[in-house]
Image (cartoon, rainbow, N blue to C red):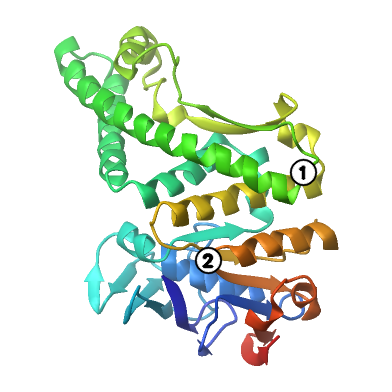
Amino acid sequence: MALTQVQIDRVRNLRGVHLEALQRVNVFYGANGSGKTSVLEAIHLLGMARSFRGNSIRSLITHGEDTCTVFGSVALPGAGALPLGIQRSRNGEAQIRLGGKTVRTVAELAEQLPLQVINADSFGLLTGSPGARRQFLDWGVFHVEQQFFPQWQRFQRCIKQRNMLLRRGKLSHQELAVWTRDLARSGAAINEFRQAYFEQLAPGFQQTMARLAPSLDTLELRFRQGWDHKLTYAEALEQGIATDREQGFTHAGPQRADIRVTSGGHPAAETLSRGQQKLVVCGLKLAQGQLMSQLGRGQCTYLIDDLPSELDRKHGGLVCELLASMDAQVFITCVERDEIQSVWPDTGGLAMFHVEHGRVSASGSA
């Protein structure tokens, strides 16, 4: 599942950009504001139908244009290629094409091009809200457990309906019990999928961090399911029914789950330096890609914006060494050509692209 070519049109300052003969590792270098990050955004748009900078599609589309489009081709295992494409309009509409056919859900697109982003916003895994960490966890579960997404959709429908009933105030116990029962079933299933995935991810994270930062030997990854672990989800819902009725929404459940990274028993965000935090973020993302590959679910594509930022040459090199050892495709940006070239362990496999004023030109292999 590696991209072999990408065509980008009207994404920020990128017009008519054609990226051909993409390799396993692709480096985009150029001055700040040249459009390097926009290339990564376009690839993210191709796999997730949105930018990783935010949900506003208007800012992503070139000023004065009504739509932006990205097309690509993904190499299939064995032989052949799968064409995929996305067009987004200023009014929010999305047209998704997969294998020459129109598809309705982003999930179908994401399944074909699993993407991981490492950029300045990735620090939110340590410093941000639990929602960002749940999204991180669910990305992994989605790509390794086929039954997760249907259960997640069912849970979203149930909790929305249950909360609507709770806000009405006057409702029969029987009416609420129907939605509570279905919510308990889907919520318990989601939690089981998350627990099983986390139990495989945590050891992989420890091994990854032992390579990236062996001095951080007190790091620990913890999972909180969103209710008292001594109770089943059905029991937690039953115990919280009075509070739910009083405040008009469901308190306990997978919607409150969280994962936290601690160092010496304290939150990593409070005890680690900025550089150490970036190494931890890289460790989390790389551990997910490794686990996905180990479980036979294909390879991950990494979009890494300005890797040298916050990292010294030694630790930047360690991240590159780990990436080079993985079965993953990498798109990475930097300002100067040699910033990645000088620390990547196998420079013979690097495809170099120069970005200037929205134009992207291949500058050979390193």
Query: Is the Cβ of the residue at disc 2 closer than 8 Å to that at disc 1?
Result: no
Residue located 51% across and 45% down the image: 136
- Locate the C terminus by quadrant: bottom right
Name the quadrant of the N terminus.
bottom left
The amino acid type of the residue labelled 1 equals Pro
> From where the camera sits, is residue 38 visible?
yes
**Residue 191 disc label:** none
| Apparent side of residue 320 relative to residue 182 in the rendered image (left or right) | right
- Per the rendering, the mark at residue 214 is 1
Q: Residues within 10 Å of mark 1 (few under 14, many from 20)?
A: few
Rendered image quadrant of residue 112 = bottom left
Secondary element under disc 1, as helix, strand or loop, is loop
Q: CA distance from mark 2 to mark 1?
A: 23 Å
Residue 350: x and y in percent read 65, 80
Judged left or right of residue 212, residue 3 is left
Residue at image position (29%, 59%) is: 105
Could you tell me which secondary element the residue under label 2 belongs to?
loop
How many marks overall?
A: 2
Between disc 2 and disc 1, whose residue precedes? 1
Q: Quadrant of residue 85?
A: bottom left
Mark 2 is surrounded, within 10 Å at the Cα level, by few (under 14), some (14 to 19) or many (20 or more) other residues, namely many
Could you tell whether 360 is left or right of 61 in the image?
right
Instruction: Please tell me whether mark 2 or mark 1 is closer to you in this view.
Output: 1
Q: Which residue is mark 2?
A: 328
- The amino acid type found where label 2 is placed reads Ala
Residue toward you, 260 or 200: 200
Residue at 42 percent across and 11 percent down: it is 230
Task: Give how far across and how far down residue 2 sits, in percent.
Answer: 45, 73
